[in-house]
Image (cartoon, rainbow, N blue to C red):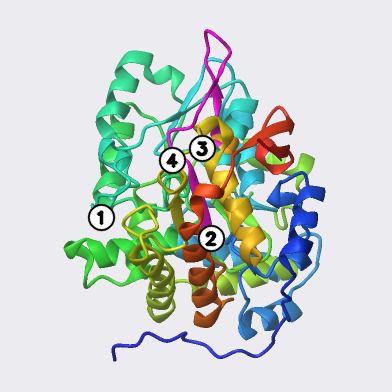
Amino acid sequence: MTVIIEPFRIKSVEPIRLTTREERERILKEAGYNLFRVKSKDILIDFLTDSGTSAMSSKQWAAIMEGDESYAGSPSFFKFEKAVRDITGFEHIIPTHQGRAAERILFSFVGGNGKIIPNNTHFDTTRANVEFTGAEAMDLIAPEAHDLQSQLPFKGNMNLDALENLFREAGPEKIPLVMITVTNNSWGGQPVSMDNIRGAKEVCDKYNTPLFLDACRFAENAYLIKRKDPAYHDVSVRDIAKEMFSHADGCTMSAKKDAFANIGGFLAMNSEDWATKARDLLILTEGFPTYGGLAGRDLAAIAQGLAEVLEEDYLEYRLASTAYLGSHIAKGGVPIVQPVGAHAIYIDARRFLPHIPPLEFPGHALACELYLAGGVRGCEIGSLMFARKDPESGEPLPAENELVRLAIPRRVYTQSHVDYVVEQILDVFRRRESIRGFRIVKQAPFLRHFTAHLEPV
Ligand SMILES: *Cc1c(COP(=O)(O)O)cnc(C)c1O
């Protein structure tokens, strides 16, 4: 078989609608040139995120009907707990309404002034939750990752020498936790190798510090390990995932990613002491420990989703459909982050729009133009999301990369949808010189990209 097909058929459909360019110009202006503020009914193909946007399976919908809404001790919780424990092996499984709730709870007692949390690359909510406690969120990406074009297999890896140096220089008492994000969402969705996870665990063990995974895309990472590391070619994805978790002491997870759920997440760990602290905080804002801010039906859908996401024909299709978009635009000359990962294509907006300076947000400008051109919504991951202030002068510093992420919802769009997106991107690429930058009119003190108002320069 050379054609890789969608390993499912479609049982239920949702209509989508194309607007005119004039309509979209008005809509975008009214939204303060912020794609997060555009109504989804005004979008044709929504690649804003793969979070919570998956198509659930008929078995997940059946699980929803069977969900038990008991306040305490619901059987849906025990199904969820078993599904998570079977994969992760962790002792304490704490449901939360999203990944960020797990982060918020964890860093409430782990973070604080003077503390440093290293990560291969913090996701935006993770960084915000670390910084909110007064701790420093430090990205330690492997040096080879800085070359966005190289074809190296594991460009999501953590820089283990830098981790070791950080422990030596700052001292282990300042580093309560090390985190590795799989796959590395903020760095091109690149995978992390098993050797790197194992190596990070060795450094952590030396300094008696727990290692946690930000496990949102653990199945995609496990499948990429299978494909790229010859030592794992013949190992099942489930066993690879289990091994990844076996090197960690806990994890945070957004079930809106690799559990095909529309909402949900969890915090899991082996430490009894930390789990007690986490459950105490959970009750304060999320709910009783057997539902944690979710309905019983959500827990049931997550349990089923976790079984489906490790099916290898699904993962093969997932990878192939993402690569299809990547290779077709790359062939047309569009600069993208290489190699292509599993959940998204990242267009390198700095090279796509070299005439727009970073602090005029080339990624944002490109994302806006893709919407205006074809009703396609992507997401800037660049200086609008990640710019920092120079600690001395207070001047804004651009982010290292200016990317536009086209995140692909799981099991949602067909190949002709993707063909349409390819056509739109290539058309925008041909007239890229006419695209202008943006300036911020209004912004919030953190996670500003969600709500900021902008205007064209
Ligand atoms: C989505 C995501 C989160 C946060 O999860 P939410 O469910 O959106 O709160 C954390 N880390 C990574 C890598 C993510 O992709």
Instruction: Kindly state the secondary structure of the residue where label 2 is placed.
Output: strand
Which of the two discs, 4 and 2, sits closer to the camera? Answer: 4
The residue located at (61%, 49%) in the rendering is 99
Left or right: 292 with respect to 199?
A: right
- Residue 39 is situated, as x and y percent measured from the top left of the image, at 78, 60
In the picture of the structure, the residue carrying the numbered disc 1 is 153
Q: Nearer the viewer, residue 368 or 114?
A: 368
Is any part of residue 57 visible from this angle?
yes
Q: Earlier in the sequence, mark 3 or mark 2?
A: 3
The magenta segment: 386-407
In the picture of the structure, the residue carrying the numbered disc 3 is 356
In the picture of the structure, the residue carrying the numbered disc 4 is 354
Q: Earlier in the sequence, mark 4 or mark 2?
A: 4
Mark 4–mark 3 distance (CA, rounded to whole Å): 6 Å
- Residue 298 is situated, as x and y percent measured from the top left of the image, at 70, 67
Based on the displayed image, in which of its 4 quarters is residue 204 positioned? Answer: top left
Q: Look at label 1 and name its amino acid.
A: Pro
Based on the displayed image, in which of its 4 quarters is residue 19 positioned? Answer: bottom right
Left or right: 347 with respect to 35?
A: left
The residue located at (75%, 56%) in the rendering is 25
Which of the two discs, 4 and 1, sits closer to the camera? Answer: 4
